[in-house]
Every structure is written in structure tokens, then in C-alpha cells.
């Protein structure tokens, strides 16, 4: 019999982490994404803010 895992038994990534990622001091890529997020936020562009957060998380997961 094939083994079937229930959804709850498989580790899930939290799609909406509580805290926004922080720029790592001294990293120009982090700084650029953080500035992009600030600009989007000040223009009330919240999808832009989310976008920058996703890019910042991906960058930090890959490059740090
Ligand atoms: Zn960085």
C-alpha cells in the first residue's frame, strides 16, 4: 500500500511570516531591497512592500 501523508504531517512554510525581513548591515543587495520597500510603503503601494519583502527573504535565504 502506498504511503500517504496528510497535509498536517508535512512541514509547511509559513506563507505569511509575522516579521518583515531586515536588511543585513553592509550588504548592498539588502539595502537596495529595503530602500525599494520603504519607497513602496511611502507611496501606499502595499503590494510593492510585499514584493520587496519576498525578494529580500529570497535574497537572504540564497546569498547569506
Ligand atoms: Zn543581503
Image (spheres, helix red, strand yellow):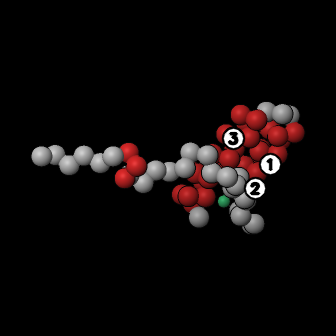
Q: Nearer the viewer, residue 4 or 14?
A: 4
Q: Earlier in the sequence, mark 1 or mark 3?
A: 1
Residue at position x 20%, y 49% from top? Answer: 3
Dot 2 and dot 1 residues touching (CB under 8 Å): yes
Q: Secondary structure at mark 2?
A: helix
Picture quarter with ligand 1 = bottom right
Comparing marks 2 and 3, which lies closer to the viewer? 3
Q: Which mark is residue 35?
A: 1
The response on whether ligand 1 sits within 8 Å of label 2 is: yes
Q: Secondary structure at mark 3?
A: helix
> Can you see residue 29?
no
Q: Which mark is residue 31?
A: 2
Q: Nearer the viewer, residue 42 or 26?
A: 42
In the rendering, at what x and y percent does residue 43 appear? 86, 34
Q: Nearer the viewer, residue 38 or 9?
A: 9
CA gap between label 2 and label 1 equals 6 Å
CA gap between label 1 and label 3 equals 13 Å
CA gap between label 2 and label 3 equals 16 Å
Amino acid at each position: 500500500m502506498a504511503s500517504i501523508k496528510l497535509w498536517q504531517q508535512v512541514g509547511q512554510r509559513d506563507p505569511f511570516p509575522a516579521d518583515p525581513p531586515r536588511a543585513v548591515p553592509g550588504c548592498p543587495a539588502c539595502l537596495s531591497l529595503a530602500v525599494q520597500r520603504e519607497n513602496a510603503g511611502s507611496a501606499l503601494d502595499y503590494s510593492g512592500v510585499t514584493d520587496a519583502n519576498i525578494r529580500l527573504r529570497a535574497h537572504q535565504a540564497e546569498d547569506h
